[in-house]
Image (cartoon, helix red, strand yellow):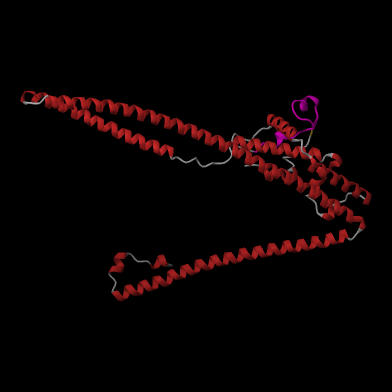
Amino acid sequence: MTDELARPESEISRMSKREREEYRRVMHVFQNRVELKQEFIRLRDDRNSLLDKVKKAERETRLANEEKKDLEKLLSSPETGYNIIVYYQLRRLWDECHSQIEGFSQVLKKQQTDRERKREIMEFNRDREKRLSQANKMVVQAKAESDELQAIINQKEQEVAARAGVLHFFNRRKMRKGMDEEKQQLAQIRAKIEELFSRRVKIESEQWPEFKGVSLKGKRAINIALVAMAQHLFLHFSDNNLGEMARQAMRQRPSEVHYGLREDCEYLMQKVAAALERLQEQSDFAEKLKARADWLRTQAEFKNENDPVPLAASLSKISTTVGKDAIETGLLLDVNVLADDYWGLLSLMVE
């Protein structure tokens, strides 16, 4: 509407003062109207967005209340109560494994960052020292040229002073002309020395470059180590198929699980508790984990040259042993911890 009311400046200039004031007043009113309309649209969109969030929160609250009632009902029954306890123990097992890998990931990222940062700073310092050495050599060379040329000029000035009298007039003028050229050359050399000193100060004051993050090679090494850790945990909880049971527990609702009678549940609870306790006591698996990662590195393939996450299909086997013997003895399990997202591994991959 304001575009329709707009008039060219030439037409406005032909208006009377009263007409121009009326025209500007009308334009101002319509401009305010447009701004108010835009603000109304924005507020309406904000209101709709908030209503959607409220509906989502209400839906989640309703589902949580329904789950709470279902859980209370299940726990109140001796027949299903033990199954629920096993269910939550298995979920705890899953969370513990996820926390183990997450902590391992943080350690690896810090180590890799420190290692690459240290190497980057060392390379920067070497390059800076090289450039400083070159600048110092140029300063020494220029200083020597300056001293040599200054000595020549001093010698000639002494010779000119010694050749006094009218008979040596033309010789003195010729010598002074040569000295003027040498003095000009000396001034250029001294300016070069000043420029070299400034360059050296600039090089000395250079700050370390900002770290741009872990390299692609480093990210790949971390991700393969995390896969190795996930495989290690799968093998640790392979007795009684606890790892797979924990994965299923993360996908099921409490009302959907059934692990057997009370005796069966008590047996599983003991196994879960014992396996978790053994996991906490482990302290000698670092070398095995490194060997497993080294073997996985020989198997890993990537979608493209810039992808830090290995293709799940290339790591579809778990070796019950590590190193070259894994292939020779055929101790390989068809379990893909990356594709099946064991222990929430996908969310911990370094991109």
Residue 336 visible in the shown view: no
Q: Nearer the viewer, residue 305 or 75?
A: 75
Residue 324 x/y as whole percent: 75, 25
Q: Quadrant of the C terminus?
A: top right
At horizontal 70% and vertical 39% (from top left) the residue drawn is 226
Residue lying at the far left of the rendered structure: 166
At horizontal 74% and vertical 40% (from top left) the residue drawn is 230
Residue 72 x/y as whole percent: 85, 61
Asked if residue 131 lies left or right of residue 242, the reply is left
Q: Nearer the viewer, residue 197 or 16?
A: 197
Residue 70 x/y as whole percent: 83, 60
Q: Is-magenta flag for residue 163?
A: no
Q: Is residue 59 above or below residue 270?
A: below
Residue 266 x/y as whole percent: 91, 49
Residue 186 visible in the shown view: yes
Q: Nearer the viewer, residue 240 or 64?
A: 240
At horizontal 79% and vertical 47% (from top left) the residue drawn is 93
Asked if residue 168 lies left or right of residue 158, the reply is left
Q: Nearer the viewer, residue 270 or 282?
A: 282
Q: Is-magenta flag for residue 321?
A: yes
Asked if residue 14 lies left or right of residue 208, the reply is left
Asked if residue 189 lies left or right of residue 349, the reply is left
Start-end of magenta stretch = 309-332
Q: Is residue 266 above or below residue 43?
A: above
Among the 4 quarters of the image, the one containing residue 196: top left
At horizontal 54% and vertical 65% (from top left) the residue drawn is 42
Among the 4 quarters of the image, the one containing residue 304: top right
Q: Is residue 132 above or below residue 212?
A: above
Q: Is residue 142 above or below residue 58?
A: above
Q: Quadrant of the N terminus?
A: bottom left
